[in-house]
Image (cartoon, rainbow, N blue to C red):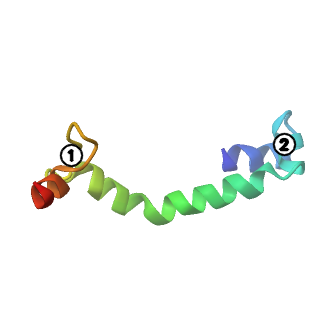
Amino acid sequence: MFELLEEGARTGTRPWARLHAEGHADHWGAAASHIEQHANSWARMLTAPDVRPVQSGRTQAKAAETG
């Protein structure tokens, strides 16, 4: 989304140029940075075999700790 807003501002493409001018890129730029900073750890957690949701919403590892 951030790249779309930036490109729209550069080329004048509607509605992206207007949304960029209204400040939407500020939010999406920060969101994109946050995602980039944490993507590896999220991928590890989402693919770890011992960290899966159980019916109560706790992870299996947490459920094993608390019984």
Q: Residue at x 20, y 41 (%)?
A: 54
Relative vertical location of residue 12 with respect to residue 44 in this rendering, above or below = above
Mark 2 and mark 1 residues within 8 Å of each other at the beta carbon: no
> Relative to the observer, which residue lies in front, 61 or 23?
61
Q: Position of residue 56 (x, y in %)?
A: 24, 40
What amino acid is labelled 2 in the image? Answer: Leu
Q: Residues within 10 Å of mark 2 (few under 14, many from 20)?
A: some
Q: Residues within 10 Å of mark 1 (few under 14, many from 20)?
A: some
Q: Position of residue 9 (x, y in %)?
A: 84, 48
Q: Position of residue 35 (x, y in %)?
A: 51, 57
Q: Which residue is tagged 1?
A: 52
What amino acid is labelled 1 in the image? Answer: Arg
Q: Which residue is tagged 2?
A: 19
Q: Which mark is residue 21?
A: none
> Relative to the observer, which residue lies in front, 17 or 42?
42
Q: In screen coordinates, is 12 left or right of 62?
A: right
In the image, which is nearer the foreground, mark 2 or mark 1?
Answer: 1
Q: Residue at x 80, y 43 (%)?
A: 8
Q: In screen coordinates, is 40 left or right of 2?
A: left
Q: Residue at x 86, y 33 (%)?
A: 14
- The N terminus lies in quadrant: top right
- The C terminus lies in quadrant: bottom left
Q: Residue at x 55, y 62 (%)?
A: 34
Secondary structure of the residue carrying tag 1 is: loop
| The quadrant where residue 64 appears | bottom left
